[in-house]
Image (cartoon, rainbow, N blue to C red):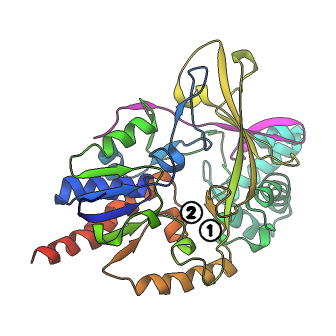
Amino acid sequence: MSRRYDWLVVGAGFTGAVVAERLARGLDQRVLVIDRRDHVGGNAHDRRDEGGRLIHPYGPHVFHTNSARIFDYLSRFTAWRPYEHRVRGWIDGRLVPLPFNLTSLRLLFPETTAARLSERMVQAFSRDARPNIHDLRAAADDPDLRRIADYVFEKVFAPYSARQWGVPVGELDASVLARVPVVVGEDDRYFTDRCQAMPRDGYSALFVRLLDHPNIHVSLNTAMTEVEPTTWDRMVYCGPLDDYFGRSAGALPYRSVRFAHCAVDVREGLPVGTVNHPQAPDFTRVTDFRHLTGEAGPTTALVTEYPLAHEPGVTEPHYPVLSETSGRLADDYRAMARTLAGKVWFAGRLADFRYYNMDQAVGRALSLVDKALAPAVAGMAA
């Protein structure tokens, strides 16, 4: 690493890789990208298992976006396979569509009751609306709507979320609750974005193409402390926000996951991409990768997810646990980050301490380059 670089990018996930590509190709900057793991792609990394099946080692990653700009940008680096994700959930011994919809209602309630409750839902929200659990509970002065709200909250949302996040549901930030819709119709797609597709050759191939530029050097199995400060001018940091500051104000809560992978006869696979288990004691969901990848064969690969607390240096951080308390601590670290303005920028799910989907991580990177890094480069040249 004796070469001098204009930028050091810490983290080779979506945010870091897109920032590096835009700096290198768009602004002709020399960029060193490092990652402490042995692969690019962050948690979106995919690979072949021992049987040759394409899997996502860190759980299912399904791309979806309403942004034509983001989709068109990534399309420079991958062709796509159309894919609309569908999820089922085991609730009271029945396998029903999730998000919870009118079909779920009919499967779980007596026929006459389900018909009455469906009618009330349509009257309250209109056909095919997707109110979130906040909206449903706020409208629950009506006893029928209260019954639906309580059922979905207690049977679907609360137990799953408590296991996923490791804290009581009441302590979670409202934005987490807002991610859970109830569908006033029969649409059983998990996402409704205009663009829903999977990279045809996989995520890892997409990342390789993103980072394939003569101005970019990638160094894997490399910690930030191993890079001499004299080898770079400015940094974009995409790792955990508190890690950068040595957790000096306290540890921010991130959630991790243990992934149990296995191969089964294709006849023992799942009917859809993912099946959630809200009422299971220790795991949250199982995914069948053949739906996501479109690959066929006599066997398929499954992964079961067991959420657990993140331990720095032991587990991988996957999700920031958003609450009033963690928000205050994150603000303290953001104040520290502002003192580094012009030298170090923080961006990404972990560094921003925000719950970004993949497209939002890409959008964050594109916006950062346009609004902050490009002007910084122009200022250096002036």
User: Badge 1, how many Cα within 10 Å: few under 14, some, many 20+?
Assistant: few
- Where residue 3 sits, quadrant-wise, is bottom left
Q: Give the residue displayed 46% in from the left and 46% down from the top.
A: 41
Residue reaching furthest to the top: 298
Is residue 98 on the magenta stretch?
yes
Q: Is residue 191 left or right of residue 135?
A: left
User: Badge 2, how many Cα within 10 Å: few under 14, some, many 20+?
Assistant: some
Magenta-colored span: 75-102
User: Could you tell me residue 321's position as x and y percent?
Assistant: 67, 67
From where the camera sits, is residue 103 visible? no
Q: Secondary structure at mark 2?
A: loop
Q: Is residue 192 above or below residue 290?
A: below
CB under 8 Å between callouts 2 and 1? yes
Identify residue type, mark 2: Tyr
| Nearer to us in this view, 100 or 172 | 172
How far apart marks 2 and 1 lie (CA) works out to: 9 Å
Q: Earlier in the sequence, mark 2 or mark 1?
A: 1
Q: Give the residue displayed 56% in from the left and 63% down from the top.
A: 355
Q: Nearer the viewer, mark 2 or mark 1?
A: 2
User: Could you tell me residue 274's position as x and y percent?
Assistant: 68, 36
- Where residue 208 sits, quadrant-wise, is top left
For the C terminus, which image quadrant? bottom left
Per the rendering, the mark at residue 175 is: 1
Q: Secondary structure at mark 1?
A: helix
| Nearer to us in this view, 332 or 269 | 332
From where the camera sits, is residue 377 visible? yes
Q: Which residue is mark 2?
A: 355
Q: Give the residue displayed 70% in from the left and 61% down from the top.
A: 310
For the N terminus, which image quadrant? bottom left
